[in-house]
């Protein structure tokens, strides 16, 4: 499984563009971040990518997991973030239905 590796110095907008491009191409998206700063940039990127994608009828969500990895012989704990794609289905109905607060997933 391939990961987009995000560091604390990664540009969230650039990572978001990569996420959105992969989603549009139908490629599975998985991020990997080590450290609080990197996780922060990764989550900001997911939020920005969501803003890019919603107007196109696609929404995304994510699920984090821990992973023990080896870097230069040292064991580190990474956060891996799986991105899930959801197609937005337009609601049908009259204007009177707009007062409903029902969430469809």
Image (cartoon, rainbow, N blue to C red):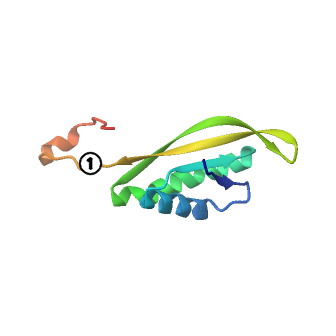
- Crowd around label 1: few <14 · some 14–19 · many ≥20 (10 Å): few
Q: Quadrant of residue 67?
A: top right
Q: Is residue 72 left or right of residue 41?
A: right
Q: Is residue 41 left or right of residue 48?
A: right
Query: Residue 76's x, y, as percent?
Result: 80, 39
Residue 11 in the image: above or below residue 86? below
Q: How many marks?
A: 1
Which residue appears farthest toward the front when viewing the image? Answer: 1
Query: Residue 87's x, y, as percent?
Result: 34, 49
Q: Residue at x 75, y 44 (%)?
A: 35
Query: In terms of depth relative to the viewer, which is nearer, 7 or 102?
Result: 7
Q: Residue at x 30, y 38 (%)?
A: 104
Q: Residue at x 52, y 51 (%)?
A: 47
Which residue appears farthest toward the left when viewing the image? Answer: 94
Q: Quadrant of the C terminus?
A: top left
Residue hosting label 1: 89
Q: Is residue 32 left or right of residue 19?
A: right
Q: Is residue 84 left or right of residue 77?
A: left
- What is the secondary structure assignment of the residue under circle 1? loop
Q: Residue at x 61, y 51 (%)?
A: 2
Query: In terms of depth relative to the viewer, which is nearer, 79 or 37?
Result: 79
Query: Residue 64's x, y, as percent?
Result: 59, 38
């Amino acid at each position: 499984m391939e990961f987009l590796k995000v560091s604390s110095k990664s540009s969230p907008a650039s990572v978001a563009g990569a996420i959105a491009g992969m989603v549009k191409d139908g490629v599975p998206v998985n991020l990997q971040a080590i450290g609080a700063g990197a996780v922060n940039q990764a989550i900001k990127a997911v939020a920005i990518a969501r803003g890019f994608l919603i107007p196109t009828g696609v929404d995304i969500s994510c699920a984090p997991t821990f992973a023990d990895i080896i870097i230069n012989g040292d064991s580190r704990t990474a956060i891996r973030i799986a991105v899930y794609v959801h197609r937005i289905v337009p609601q049908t109905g009259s204007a009177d239905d707009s007062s409903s607060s029902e969430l469809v997933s």
